[in-house]
Image: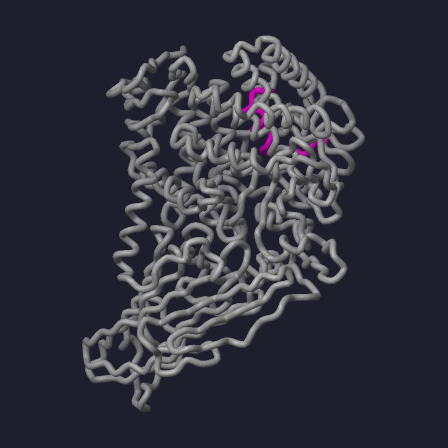
Amino acid sequence: MSRSQGSPERRQGRERRADETVVATTSAERYVMSAGRTSRLAVKEGDLFLYSDDLGQVPGAENSALGLYHRDTRYLSRLELFVAGRQPVLLSAGAEPGYAATVELTNLEARTADGHALPQASIHVRRTRLVSDRLHETLRVCNYHRREVEVFIDLHFDADFADLFEVRGSRRRRRGSRMAPRVQGSTLTLSYFGLDEVMRQTVVRFHDPPESFKQGRARFRLRLSPRQRTVIRYEVQVTDLDTPGEAGGDLDERIGVLRREYERWESGATLIHTDNDHVNRALRRGQQDLRLLSAVVDGERIPLTGLPWFMAPFGREMAFVGLETLLLDLRWARAAVAFLAGRQGTVDNAFREEQPGKIMHELRRGELAATRAVPHTPYYGSVDATALWLLLVGELAVWTGDLESFEARGPAVDAALAWIDGPGDPDGDGFVEYERRSRVGLRNQGWRNSVDALVHADGARVEGLVALAETQGYVYYAKRRLAGVFGQLGDVERAERLTLEAERLKSAFNRRFWMEDEGYFAMALDGRKRQVRTVCSTVGHALWSRIVADEYVPAVVRRLMASDMCSGWGIRTLSREARAYNPVSFYNGSVWPFDTALIANGLKKHGYVQESNRLAWELVEAATAHRYARLPEMVCGFTRQGTDHPVSFPMACSPDANSAAALFLVLQSMLGIYAQAEENIVYVHNPVLPRWLGEVTLSNLHVGRTTMRLRFRRAGGQTSFAVLDKQGPGRIVVVE
């Protein structure tokens, strides 16, 4: 599965084995799946998450994506509550902690269990749920009718055990075997034996026995006096959890335990406080979402990508999260570097698009991956993950000063560089390129990886080997950063060679990609080495990487900030003037917060402070306009003057890791903080707080062996900073 929800390529066409073909659905069918979607409640911890509607319901409807998931398998496709035989009415709902949700419900007019009229709004149900080692739910039912009532409370359960690829629209001709539901006392067991010969089970346990429990329905007959309350408690466990945990226990106590675990995790990060409550809330949300979206794999907590579609490790996204959060928390960078190094390509495998030295694109752990119906075990169809991993390795060395760990990664770094200079450049022209090798792989293998995201200005599809503009920038940036680290290690020859290679790439890039008549860079070069002249946002990534020659920077900035590119909520992925422009598309006109954050950082690097801070405020306002101050994966690209709030994208992940991390990179840009940890130096270059931010304090900031507390203040048009506390040998160097 690719990061692009809209790509027919990611449906994976046909399966490798003849006995279980995976058939693609159309884009139109996928939009029908999400049509009319409003808000959703998402609660998650580790590899387990529940995705429901705002009533907390999973209705089990056809083409619905709602359900309880674990490692790419849906373990509950139905979880529905009925009050007096009818769907309840929503009063309020919220899942701000991320791991817990509370839903307030009441009843429609109905009949009681003994046949009397039950007026609407007589029964109140508070539905409190927690996802930790399993799903825990408590129903607190209260009678507000003036008379005693006898009412049925029904809970319906079912599990289709669908692989996430199936949930997203793929069909297959063969499935494993679903067993008949089994009820023993207060426990319901739903089972499925997959084609991968794994038995998957969903076990529902009630703390107090229902009156009846059959065909997946648990029925409680409650007799409640006026103002009387009662509680129904149950839990849902999937059988392949690594740590089953203990049954029972008070739900509030369990929530408290998980809250304290979050607090312990966050105590290891930089504490950021500003004098703007909107900024504080958005930053806080981003930090919580990064923890929420993570999971422990092979003993280390790593960032996953986005809920619900991408609760899996993605190479590109893990690298971007690490690069975005250097100021906040170096643990994300460390985890990404180690995890991706452990899954670096070692052989040539066309089905998985694996090559020695290449960094993976995506890892899946469901039935279809296990049976090789899809190549995600892992899949390597990403042209840029290798360069981004190398860049992150270099940045981690610069921020931690841990050159021993860098040297220990030497073989992996060598292999990645060899891939870039070898198989990554199949025609030897000096540019890193891609062309799909796997018949079930991605057609487009950069960040913009949907099938329609790479087109010529006249709308024609780009064919042959493709050299993306941003990928060349990533390679340039990585080689420059690694050259600096090798220089610190005393390997002058290698440092000079990498520097020379980077400069040659920069020269070739500016010569071949520049469009004089557009005053902008081409999106890519196609297989015939023709410029793909569509104006897109990822040229801003080239600005961020500094591969853009100085003489072209002003023109690139003007175009990025022009009305056809800048929507008012961030930078559009495609110019509004492009033939392929569509504001309700994945990459042809939508706005991605992380994309805008990279551009804002690039603008600041080149001295365009006001433009950078303008984009920062647009992201803050976009976050404020969303539920929980959460930046989603993307928003529609409609112009701000036409809308007073960002228009939600129907299939965007929320929360999304790259978006959660975006504002930390933006803040680093504002403050101008960079590191050289081996020399225990923190550089502060041209800090400029915007008019909407008067003060920023960073506490527990880690650079190398030094921990510090810094305060930045704006007075009029000037920003100053002070060192409030410092532990360790580090020093602050102001760069004019």
Task: Residue 641: tell me if it is visible.
Answer: no
Specify whether 145 is left or right of 301. Answer: left
Q: Quadrant of the C terminus?
A: top left
Decide whether residue 227 is among the magenta residues. Answer: no
Specify whether 658 is left or right of 704. Answer: right
* Residue 321 against residue 202 in the figure, above or below: above
* Residue 414 against residue 22 in the figure, above or below: above
Tell me which segment is drawn in magenta.
Answer: 532-547
- The residue most toward the right is 528
Q: Which residue is drawn at 48% across and 19% down?
A: 403
- The residue most toward the bottom is 115
- Where is residue 77 drawn, in percent x and y? 51, 66
Q: Residue at x 46, y 26 (%)?
A: 611
- Where is residue 240 drawn, in percent x and y? 49, 58
- Where is residue 458 drawn, in percent x and y? 74, 39
Task: Residue 240: tell me if it is visible.
Answer: yes
Q: Residue at x 61, y 16 (%)?
A: 549
